């Protein structure tokens, strides 16, 4: 009778250990997934900041008088093809309307200090076709910048 009880208790202990190991594996999988997702979101945020700075440089280098218009949309793709950024320039704040031949400029500013500000909407999306991206990431930001 004691030998039969020992086999049953050994099987119960093995089942408990197997269940515990299954829970540990599941928790570690969830932890790895969370870390990976956090890394991708942070990388998307850094790419958004880089896109904003590159957009400011593009606005500074764009000759509005020669082209008789202003930049309205700018598109960037990162070097790894993981993210793409679409920047829409919502408003140009110009003190003098002769300096801004734009259709979307605000001419109601009262001081030269506000001249040159740009209101832009930045949208960063992940490229799902990239094998290193495992989920869709979309970040949007509206920011006021001075080139």
Image (spheres, rainbow, N blue to C red):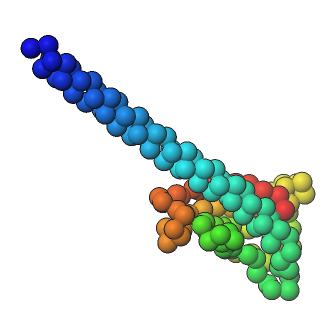
- Residue furthest right in the image: 112
Q: Residue 49 lies in what quarter of the image?
A: bottom right
Q: Percent x, y for residue 2?
A: 14, 13
Residue at the spot x=86%, y=75% of the render?
A: 61
146 relative to 131 in the view: left or right? right
Q: Percent x, y for residue 141?
A: 63, 54
- Nearest the eye: 60 or 38: 38
- Nearest the eye: 35 or 105: 35
Q: Is residue 11 visible?
A: yes
78 relative to 32 in the view: left or right? right
- As drawn, 91 above or below 101: above
Residue at the spot x=46%, y=39% of the render?
A: 28
Q: Locate the N terminus and report the quarter of the image it occupies.
A: top left
Q: Residue 116 lies in what quarter of the image?
A: bottom right
Q: Percent x, y for residue 124?
A: 60, 62
Residue at the spot x=41%, y=40% of the render?
A: 25
134 relative to 15 in the view: left or right? right
Q: Is residue 119 visible?
A: no
- Nearest the eye: 75 or 142: 75
């Amino acid at each position: 009778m004691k030998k039969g009880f020992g086999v049953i208790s050994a099987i119960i202990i093995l089942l408990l250990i197997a269940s515990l190991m299954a829970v540990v594996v599941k928790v570690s999988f969830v932890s790895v997934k969370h870390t990976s997702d956090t890394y991708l979101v942070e990388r998307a945020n850094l790419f958004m900041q880089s896109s904003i700075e590159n957009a400011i440089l593009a606005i500074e280098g764009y000759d509005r008088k020669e082209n008789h218009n202003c930049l309205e949309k700018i598109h960037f793709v990162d070097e790894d093809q993981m993210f793409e950024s679409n920047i829409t320039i919502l408003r140009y704040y110009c003190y003098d309307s002769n300096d801004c031949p734009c259709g979307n400029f605000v001419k109601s500013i009262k001081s030269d200090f506000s001249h040159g500000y740009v209101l832009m909407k930045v949208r960063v999306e992940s490229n799902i076709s990239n094998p290193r991206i495992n989920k869709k990431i979309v970040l949007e930001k509206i920011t006021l910048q001075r080139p």
